[in-house]
Structure formats: structure tokens, C-alpha cells
């Protein structure tokens, strides 16, 4: 589970940075890097979204930072 958590967090960071670049500079780095493979771009976006759902669902029970003291 630790590896899955690390992968999910990494994908969320990639997604967050991509959205930041889109908002600031209208530059989509995922599309710029993988644009020649539109299917892969869509897979990346699906994985980022799935990672967000996974982290949201597991954070309250497994994340020390999110536990109430």
C-alpha cells in the first residue's frame, strides 16, 4: 500500500503542477510531452483523477497529517 500511496501522491503533484502551469501560462505540459499520443494523455488524466479519489478516500484513515488529534 505504501507504493500505491507514493504513486498516487506523485500523480497528484504532476496534476497540480500541470494545472498551475495552465492557469498561469496557458501551457499544458502533459499535452506538450505526450500530445503525439492522445490516448496516453487521456490515461494520464484518468490516473491523476483516480489518484485524487484514492487519496481523498484513504487520507482520513491512513494519513497521519489528516488524523484528528
Image: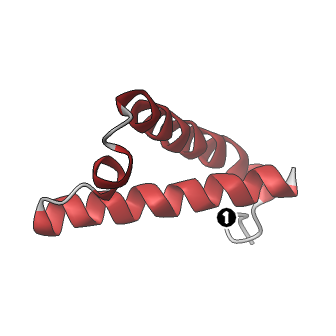
SS class of the residue under badge 1? loop
Q: Nearer the viewer, residue 68 or 21?
A: 21
> In the visual, does 41 lie left or right of 4?
left
- Which residue occupies 64% across, 49% down? 55
- Where is residue 33, by image quadrant? bottom left
Residue pictured at 24% horizontal, 66% vertical = 21
Q: Position of residue 38 (x, y in %)?
A: 35, 31
64 with respect to 43 (left or right): right
Instruction: Report which residue position mark 1 lands on.
Output: 66
* Residue under the point 54% across and 45% down: 52
Q: How is the image coloured?
A: secondary structure
Q: Residue furthest front?
A: 36
Q: Dot 1 surroundings within 10 Å: few (below 14), some, or many (20 or more)? A: few
Viewer-closest of 54 and 11 = 11
Is 39 located above or below residue 41 in the figure? Answer: above
Q: Which quarter of the figure has residue 11?
A: bottom right
Amino acid at each position: 500500500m505504501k507504493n500505491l500511496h507514493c504513486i498516487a501522491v506523485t500523480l497528484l503533484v504532476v496534476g497540480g503542477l500541470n494545472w498551475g502551469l495552465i492557469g498561469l501560462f496557458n501551457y499544458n505540459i502533459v499535452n506538450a510531452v505526450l500530445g503525439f499520443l492522445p490516448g496516453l494523455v487521456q490515461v494520464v488524466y484518468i490516473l491523476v483523477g483516480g489518484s485524487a479519489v484514492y487519496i481523498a478516500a484513504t487520507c482520513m484513515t491512513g494519513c497521519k497529517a489528516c488524523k484528528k488529534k
